[in-house]
Image (tube, rainbow, N blue to C red):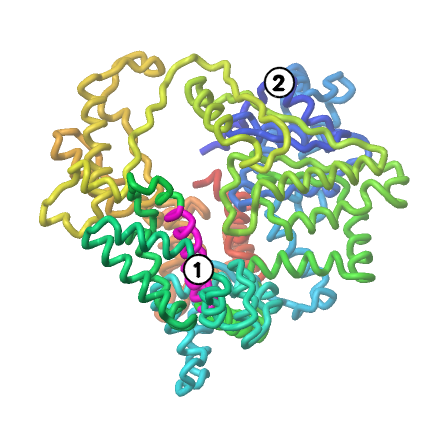
Amino acid sequence: MSDPEPKKVHQLTNAQQAAVEPADNIWLSASAGSGKTQVLSARVIRLMLSPQVRPENLLCLTFTKAAAAEMADRINRKLASWVQMKDGDLAAELRAIGADYSKQKLPAARKLFAEVLDAPGGGLQIMTIHSFCQSLLESFPEEAGLLPGFEAIEGRAKDKLLSDTLAELLSDAPAEEPDGLIAKIQQLSLDMGEAGAFAFLCRCADRPAVLRSLPDGQGMLVAAQRIVGLSLDTDIETALAALCSDDVIDRTLISQIAQSNRAWNTSTGTKRADQIAIWLSRDPENRAATLDDLHLCWSTKSGTLAQQYDKKDPSYLRLAQEAFDWTTSLVEMRILAKYAERLASALIAGKAFAARFERAKHERGLVDFDDLISNAAALLSRPGMGEWVRYKLDQRIDHILVDEAQDTNAAQWDIIKALTADYYSGLAAKEGRPRTLFAVGDYKQAIYGFQGTDPERYEEAGNDFKERIANGDSELKRLTLAQSFRSTRPILDFVNAVIDGLGPAVLGINGDIAQHFSELPDIGSISLMKLVSPKQFDSDGEGDDDADENWLSEEKLVLADRIANHVRELIDHSPYLASKKRRLVPGDILILLRKRTDLAGLIVARLHALNVPVAGIDRLQISEPIAVQDLLAAIRFALQPDDDLSLSALLVSPLIGWSQQDLLDYGYRPKGEPLWKHLREQDALAADLAPLHAILASVDFSTPYAFLEQILSGPTQGRRKL
C-alpha cells in the first residue's frame, strides 16, 4: 500500500494570506471550517522558508495529541512531496501560500524536508502544552523541585491512584470522631451520591494550591460563608434572631397584612392572621426558628408571591410584596448558611484528600497533567532560576504558534507569556532575530470551562500581548477568518443569529463579531424542535405508559417520540436533496447524541415501531480492526518479549511482513526455547528483526502515545504498511 497523497494546497484567501505572513505577530479568530489547519501549516512552512529560521526555532502548541500528530503529518507529507515535484507544480504550491516562487527559491523549498529530519529532537516541535511542560521539567527536574526520572500519570493509572488514596485516607482516619473526616465524607456522599462525592474530591485533588490557600477548622466555615456571599459575626440563628427583634422588623406592615387577612372572613385568611399574631407574640429566638411559618402567610409553597387581591384594600398586594421580599431574604440567608456549613465540611474533606494525593504522587515520583502545568509555570517565573531557564529556551525558540487558543487556561497563558518575555524587550529584541507569536482560536468553541478555560481569558491574553508587543515597537495584528468552506449559508445564518442574540459580551469579546459567510451552494436548512422539559408532562399529556419503559425518565420518552415522529414525517415527505441530486431516503438521516445512553436504544425502538428502516446504534469496538490487533501484538511483545504467541502474530503482521511459511521455517526450534531467543541467534535475520529491536529499545523511554506513533510514523513506517 502506497502513502496517501498529501492534501492539495488550495490558494489562500486574502484573509488567510495575511495570517501566514511570517514576520507578523498574529491573533487570529478562525471558525470551524475556515481553513485554520491549512493556515497553520502554511505559516509553519513560510517561517521555515524565511532567512535565519531553522525548524528547531519553531514551537507549535496544540490542545490534543491527535491535533499535533495531524499537523506534523500534514506538514511532513507536504515537504516530502516537494522533494521530487516538478518545478512548475512546486512553484504553484508556493504561490498558493504566498511564498516566493521564483526559480532560485525552489531548491530551498526542496531542502526543507531534510532540514526537518535533521533538526534536533528529530523533527518539528509540534506538541501539546502538557508534552512541552513535561519535556521542560525533564530537562530541569531539580530546579523545578521534582525527582529526576519522574513519570507523568494519566487515565486509568491516575484513576486507580485516586481510588487507592481515598481508601488509605479513610483507613487512617479515626472512626470514632463524630464530626471527623469519615463523617464529612459520608455527609458528602449523602449530599452528592457516591460517584458525585468522589468526583468532587478528585476536583479538589486537581487544585491542591487552591485548597492549601484555604484555612483549617472554623476558618474554613468563614471562608465558605464568604464564598456564598455571607458575612456573619456569629452563628446563623443568633444573627436571624437579631433581625427578628422588634427594633428591626416592621410591625406596622405585618399587622396591616394580618388585619386584611382577617377581614376577608375566610378560613385561609383567618388562619394566616392567627399565625401572624402568634409569630409576633414570640421572642426573637423563636421568631427566627419559625420564619418559614410566617413566610407562608404571603408566599406559595413553591416560593412565589401569593397573588391575592383585596378590592377593599388595593394596597394589599404591594404590602404583601414588601413582606415577601423581607422574609425571602431571611429564609435565603438561612439556606445559604446551611449550604456554607456543608461546603466547609466538603472542603475540609477535599483539602485532606488533595494533600494525601499530593503525597502519594510525590512518594511514587508521579505528576499529573495539572502538575505539569503548575510546575512549569512556577519554574519559569521563579526569580533567578526562571530567568536562566528562559534564557536557555530563548536561545532556541524564536516563533511560537498556539492552536485552539480559546481552550488555553490562565496558567497555560502564563507559560506562553514567560516563553515570550524577552521577544519584544531587552537584548534579545535588539539582536535582529525575527521573533513572532501566532495564536488561533474560536470563541464559539470554548467548551473546556471545567478545566479553567474561559473566552474572557483568551481576550485578556490577546490584550496583554498586544500591549507588550506595542511596547517593543511592533504590532499584534488581530485577524478573522469568517468564510466557511464546510458549512452552507443556512447553517451560518443560524450561527450569526444566535451570536447576535447573545451579544459579544457573553463570549468575552469587547468589539463586534464578524458575520460568517460561505460561497458554497445555498442549500440545507435548520429546524428547531420544541424544548423538552420535565415540568411540561402533566399539561401536554405526552409520554408512554408502557410498563417495560416506565423506568425511563418521562422527558426521554417524550424526546424519543418526537424524534422518531419527525424522522417518519421526513421520510413520508421525501424532500429533494440538492447535494445528492435525488430525494431523501432513510439512509440519509443520521441522529447524533452527546452520549450513548438508554435514549439511543429508545429512539431505535420508536423508529422500528413506526416502520422506519434503521441500522441501529453504532458501536465501535476499537480492538476489532486487524490493524489495531497488530499494534496490540507489538505492545504485548514490548512488555513481554518471551510471549511467543504475540511475537508470532507480530511477525506475520504487515509491520514485519513475514508469511506463515517464513514463521515455520525460521521459528522451528527445540521444545521450551523462547521464540525471541531463537530468532536473535540467527544472523541472517538481523535486518528483519531490526524493527523489533527498535521497539524494545524505545519502550522504556516513551509514553504509550509516542511509542505507537513511532511504530506508525518512524522507520518502521507502520501506517503505510498497515
Q: Which residue is drawn at 33% across and 27% down?
A: 528
Give the numbered dot on residue 330.
1
Secondary structure mostly taken by the magenta-highlighted segment of the chain: helix
In the image, taking residue 306 as reference, residue 245 lies left or right, namely: right
Q: Where is residue 397 in the image (x, y as percent from the top left)?
A: 75, 45
Q: Does the magenta stretch include residue 642?
A: no
Residue under the image location 69 percent in, 50 percent down: 414
- Across and down, in percent, residue 679 comes to 46, 60
Outermost residue toward the left in this view:
547
> In the figure, is residue 44 to the left or right of 175?
right
| Secondary structure state at the residue bearing disc 2 | loop
Q: As rendered, which of 561 and 271 lies closer to the eye? A: 271
Q: Mark 2 points at which residue?
A: 13
Question: Crowding near pointer 2: few (<14 within 10 Å), some, many (20+)?
Answer: some
Q: Residues within 10 Å of mark 1 (few under 14, many from 20)?
A: some
Q: In this view, does 691 lie above or below 351?
A: above
Camera-side residue of 372 and 472: 472
Q: Measured from the top left, where is residue 117 in percent x and y?
A: 67, 41
Which residues fall within the magenta stretch? 319-341
Q: Which residue is drawn at 71% across and 22% down?
A: 99
